[in-house]
Image (cartoon, grey):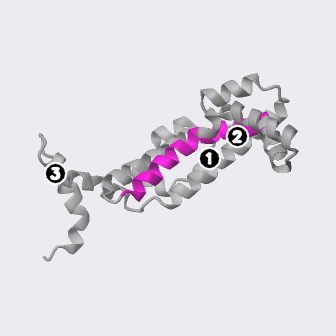
Amino acid sequence: MTILDQWDALKLHFQLAASTERCYTAQQLCDMFSDICNKLYVLCMRKVLTEVNKMNKAFQAANADVTKLTTDLLQLYACLMQLVVIPAILEKLPTNSLDSFAFREHLMPISCVHFGFEFENACGTASLPTDQLLSIRERCRNFVVELADQVQMHLPSNIETLLLLERLKPSAATSLPIPSLASLTGRFRHLIDR
C-alpha cells in the first residue's frame, strides 16, 4: 500500500500544510497520520488486503480460468483462516466442507493472532497501553473474521467438482500420467441416458 510506504512524508506534508495554511482538513489529516493506532490498523490491512486485491484482479480478468479462480479463492480463504483459526482445527478440515465450516467456533485467542512482522514490530515499538494494543488486535481480528465470512459466502457449493475440472485443461490432458476423469464423470451420472 502506497500510503504506508510514504507514511512519514505524508505526515510531514500535512504538518506543514496545517501550520502554514491553517487548513482544517490538513490538520485533521496531520492528526490521523500522527496517531500510531491508525498506522497499526493500516499495517494489519496491508497484509490482508494485498491478497484480496489479487483475488479481485483475477475475477475481473477478461479470460479468467474457472479452475484457477476456484483455487485462488480457496487460497484466499485459507490465508484468512490461518490468521484467526486454531491451526490444529485447520489441519483436519477437508476441502469439501470449507463452505459450511463454522470457523467462528474455533478462533484463536487474540494474543495468539499474528498479523505479520511489520505489525508486530510496530506494536512492540509503540508506546501504547496494553489494553489499547489488545483493543487494536481485537478490531483487526474482527475485520479478518468478517472478511472470511464474506469470502465463505462466495465459496461455491461444488468446490470439489470445480477443482476436478482442472483435469480437462490441455496441459493436464497432455501430461504424463494422464489424470483419470472417473471421479469427475461420476459426478454427472444423472445426465447420462441409461
Q: Nearer the viewer, mark 2 or mark 3?
A: 2
Q: Which residue type carries mark 1? A: Val
Horizontal and vertical percent position of residue 142: 68, 48
Q: Circle 2 — which element?
A: helix
Q: In this rendering, is residue 83 above or below 166? A: above
- In the picture, the disc for residue 170 is 3
Q: Which mark is residue 41?
A: 2
Query: Are the residues tagged 2 and 3 within 8 Å (C-beta)?
Result: no
Instruction: Give the left or right position of residue 97, taking residue 129 as reference.
Output: left
Identity of the residue drawn at 47% across and 38% down: 91
Crowd class of label 2 (few under 14; some 14 to 19; many from 20; radius 10 Å): some
Question: Which kind of residue does numbered mark 2 sit on?
Answer: Tyr
Q: Alpha-carbon distance for marks 2 and 1?
A: 12 Å
Task: Residue type at mark 3: give it.
Answer: Pro
Q: Which residue is mark 1?
A: 144
Q: Secondary structure at mark 3?
A: helix
Q: Which image quarter is the C terminus in?
A: bottom left
Is 180 placed left or right of 46 in the picture?
A: left
In the image, residue 157 lies at what x, y percent? 42, 62
Return the disc, 2 or 3, that comes first in the chain's sequence: 2
Q: Residue at x 82, y 25 (%)?
A: 127
Is 16 left, or right, of 95 in this rendering?
A: right
Camera-nearest label, 2 or 1: 2
**Label 1: which secondary element:** helix
Q: Label 2, label 3: how many angstroms apart (C-alpha)?
A: 44 Å
Residue at image position (83%, 29%) is 128
Q: Where does residue 64 sit, x and y in percent of width and height?
A: 33, 56
Residues 14 and 146: in front is 14
Asked whether the viewer can see residue 35, the reply is: no
Q: Tell me if residue 49 is in the magenta stretch.
A: yes
